[in-house]
Image: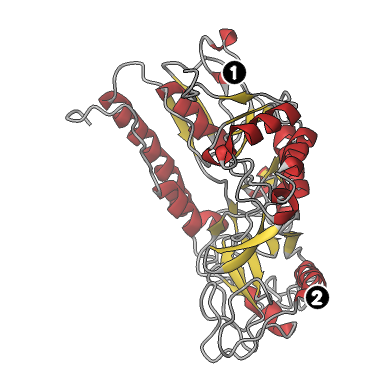
Amino acid sequence: MRLYRPDLAMVGYPIADEFQHQFLGLITPVLPNGAPNPAYDDVQVNGTPDGRVARRTAFVKRAYTGADSTLDLVQELMPRNTSAFVASDHGFAPQFLAIDASKVLVDLGLLSKPQTSNCRPATGETIGKAKACWAGGTVQVYLNLQGRDPVIAGLQQVSATLEVATVDQIKSAFLALSDPNDWTRDGQAEGWQVIDRAYTKAEARYIPNGAGSTADMAHPTRTGDVVAFAYPPYQFDAATPGTLVARSAFFGQHGYVPDVQNLAANINMRATFIGGGGSVRPNVVAAGLRTIDLAPTIAYLLDVPVPQHSQGEVRLDLLRGSESRTLVPIVGLTDFHGQLEQTTAVYDNNINSPVGGSSQLATMFDEEAAAFPQRPFLFASGDNVGASPANSGLLEDRPAIDVENAWGMHATSYGNHEFDYGVERLLKHQARANFPFLGANIVDETTG
């Protein structure tokens, strides 16, 4: 760092994460329901104490001491009074039990045998109508859907007409899970909550993230058709194939619903967001902070463009001198090409996914606008018309302009397709539009 003198140092310290994975459930006396934790000081969960609580607690504390020391070192190597942010991408919870998510699919007749690895059907699978992909406290179930997913020899697909019913069936099955084991050795199966909440892909746009806040984990191809969240002390990693619930190989986890907190049971899914020095205002306790706000805020301080796929906001309320600045929210559209009706496109592992559609886009614009504190501008970067489907193109793309008027478009720039049918057509579009066409480098060769 002394040699290259970076403008930005991104420094990680994974030990705090790894030590809590290993030990948190072994040093937590109670479960979320207040009952004694059978794994407390008992790595085998057999009723025989290990006598190692103090040592395991020391490991976790030492991890945080190491994180502090690493931050001190980086601050010494960076210029004096550099802005510093400390953040984590998740919280943590104690756990000691693993759910085999694929067994749920076997019991529903969607798989012929349990998966032996994440996201992959087992060797010799003969049904394959769905698969489970898990990480920590979250499992995502993907249908092998007719017309959407590529055909794989030897596997069956869910009919498109049964998609909704199958999704509902899977969601209900996860929510109804119960643990048949007796971990407390009282002669009865445990009545603990196994699954916290479950969502469809559409519902995953609004995952609870604390009071008055949601997190968007919906993606057209990468989010599961069903997303289910376990509840501590359950999770999905290191499961025993074919056994619904078994002991896991470690004792701490994340990936639960972000609003889950129970400090008495060492459960806190809230991530860390701390800033100081340099451009950061002192003594500010900010409301509504999200980890996704970190990247845009750092980009703002570096005076570089905000990362293209970031979803957070620049948190001016954390920064010195921000009183004189106002952020202008913008929702952007490009290459509409008169796609009035929704269609499909094949991408991302050959998945045939829905794209476009004026009504679908209108809903997305409204959803994006609702995330801003004030109404954003809706701008298009051009190619609103041209190369359009027949229901717009045969009508000289007048319907495309009408739709953008209905959206409340504020302005568009010119794309090359605006000129497909000459200046006369373009002038008609401009006259029809309720918004301006903006350009600084378009010159009429005749008039200059």
Colouring scheme, one of rainbow, by chain, secondary structure, one colour: secondary structure
Toward the viewer: 444 or 368?
A: 444
Residue 433 in picture, x, y percent from top left: 73, 29
**Looking at the image, is 57 positioned above or below residue 439?**
below
**Amino acid type, label 2:** Thr
Residue 82 in picture, x, y percent from top left: 36, 20
**Residue 291 tag number:** none
Q: Residue at x 56, y 79 (%)?
A: 240
Toward the viewer: 390 or 303?
A: 390
Residue 358 in picture, x, y percent from top left: 74, 47
**Amino acid type, label 1:** Asp
Q: Which residue is mark 2?
A: 161
**Within the image, what quadrant is residue 99 found in?**
bottom right
Instruction: Say whether residue 213 is visible.
Output: no
**Within the image, what quadrant is residue 132 found in?**
bottom right
Q: Which residue is mark 1?
A: 317
The label nearer to you, 2 versus 1, is 2
What residue occupies the far front of the structure in this picture?
Answer: 446
Distance of mark 2 from mark 1, alpha carbons?
A: 50 Å
Work out whether mark 2 precedes mark 1 in sequence or the reverse, and give the earlier one. 2
User: Under tag 2, what secondary structure?
Assistant: helix
User: Under tag 1, what secondary structure?
Assistant: helix
Q: Residue at x 72, y 79 (%)?
A: 158
**Few, some or many residues within 10 Å of mark 1 (<14, 14–19, 20+):** some
Q: Residue at x 69, y 47 (%)?
A: 260
**Looking at the image, is 83 positioned above or below residue 230?**
above
**Looking at the image, is 200 positioned above or below residue 68?**
below
Toward the viewer: 253 or 433?
A: 433
**Few, some or many residues within 10 Å of mark 2 (<14, 14–19, 20+):** few
